[in-house]
Amino acid sequence: MAIDRDAQYEVIDPQATGTEAVDRAFENQVAYCRDNGAQITADICAALRELLDSERGGAVMRRVRMWAGPPLADALPLRVAGGLHALHLSGDAPELAPLFTGQRVSEAAALLADVMERHEAVLMPWLDGPPQTNEAGRSACYAAALLWLADRGLAGDFALYELGSSAGVNLMMRRYRYDLGGTTTGPATARMQIAPDWRGDPPPQADIDIVAARGCDIKPVDLTDEDAALRLRAYIWPEQTERFARLDAAIAAARTFPPEVERQAADAFVAAMAQNEGPGAGTTRVLMHSVVWQYLPQEQRERIEATMEELGAAASEDAPLAWISLEANRDLHRHELRVRYWPGGEEWHTLATAHPHGAWIEWTG
């Protein structure tokens, strides 16, 4: 099986629905994975796309073909691929091993159809919710943004509030060590050592500390639960072996001292953050999120923006506020690290573009 090199990424409305949107979601996913070095996942999504034009794949593919929501915003291809990867990792579908180890496979679509038809009961629930791609590599962007904010004069003690925290992997970043193009921060002896391929000038060196970290998720994941950990592993692209090692390190950290993740909608979490008196003078409150914004309903996004405007208007030199966003720019087909802070700099600043899972960061800040 070879990568579908003809697949092209095309910008469409993320909220588009219907059969054409389903087909486009799979083609975009193939191109996206291919262009980000995920050949195995690209091939699997290409085989799934082939099944769209057939009657194979049982109830799973029937539901995919008739998807009621927006397949691009719902990351529909990754929901299916994640369930198949879980079957491979669990050993319950050994015939998938050649696919997930990058071997050449003839009739890959037929193989996947056979597996889906035999494992419908296991795979159908994977369609019920968005992918859980809690990735410690993304926290390198958070760390770089915190250094930049401190260099801008904001208080170097940070209280973090993360949207869509999933298992809280990034809430534990105080325990991670970062090498960001030669600029380092975090404990030198940390088990989690994160050093992305850095492009451009390094971020500024600054003294920073994370004094508090809380997050929310509509379906929090317990890293210490084996089934939950399998779900997270299933959403890791199989060729990116370093991500499995990072997840293992995060699981070890959670067993020592678990992160604080509340079961709460994002807008309610930000509203509660606004009502809280805050960490006190000399601390910067930071709202942050990575590859989450696209999954929030429009009305939630609008409420969050309105609340942050209100909080920003009340921010002061002694009690500053910042907003860090690492999200996909679908027009440019890349992920951007953007920061906004109060007082004194209400516009968004684009600091970097980055690999979706932290493999590289191109700094422009």
Image (spheres, rainbow, N blue to C red):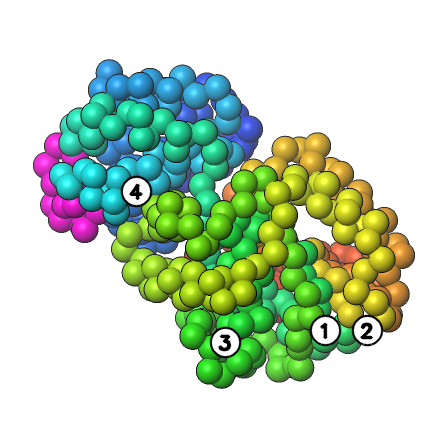
Mark 1 in CB contact with mark 2 (< 8 angstroms): yes
User: Mark 3 belongs to which amino acid?
Assistant: Arg
Locate residue 1 relative to residue 336 in the image: left or right: left
**Crowd rating for badge 2 (residues with CA inside 10 Å; few <14, some 14–19, many 20+):** some
User: What is the CA distance from the residue labelled 2 to the residue labelled 4?
Assistant: 45 Å
Q: How many marks?
A: 4
User: What is the CA distance from the residue labelled 3 to the residue labelled 2?
Assistant: 24 Å
User: Mark 1 belongs to which amino acid?
Assistant: Asp
Q: Is residue 209 magenta?
A: no
Locate residue 212 relative to residue 70 in the image: left or right: right
Mark 3 in CB contact with mark 4 (< 8 angstroms): no
| Residue identified by numbered label 2 | 282
User: What is the CA distance from the residue labelled 1 to the residue labelled 2?
Assistant: 7 Å
**Identity of the residue drawn at 65% across and 57% down:** 214
Instruction: Please provide the residue range marked out in magenta.
Output: 96-109
Choose between 119 and 72: the one closer to the eye. Answer: 119
Q: Quadrant of residue 156?
A: bottom right
Against 1, is 212 above or below? Answer: below
| Residue identified by numbered label 3 | 177
Residue 126 image offset from top left, x and y in percent: 39, 33
Mark 3 in CB contact with mark 1 (< 8 angstroms): no
Residue 137 in view: no
Query: Secondary structure under badge 2?
Result: loop
Say whether disc 2 or disc 4 marks the residue closer to the N-terminus: 4
Residue 224 image offset from top left, x and y in percent: 44, 55
| Residue identified by numbered label 4 | 86
Residue 157 is tagged as 1
User: Mark 4 belongs to which amino acid?
Assistant: Ala
**Identity of the residue drawn at 72% across and 41% down:** 268
**Crowd rating for badge 3 (residues with CA inside 10 Å; few <14, some 14–19, many 20+):** many
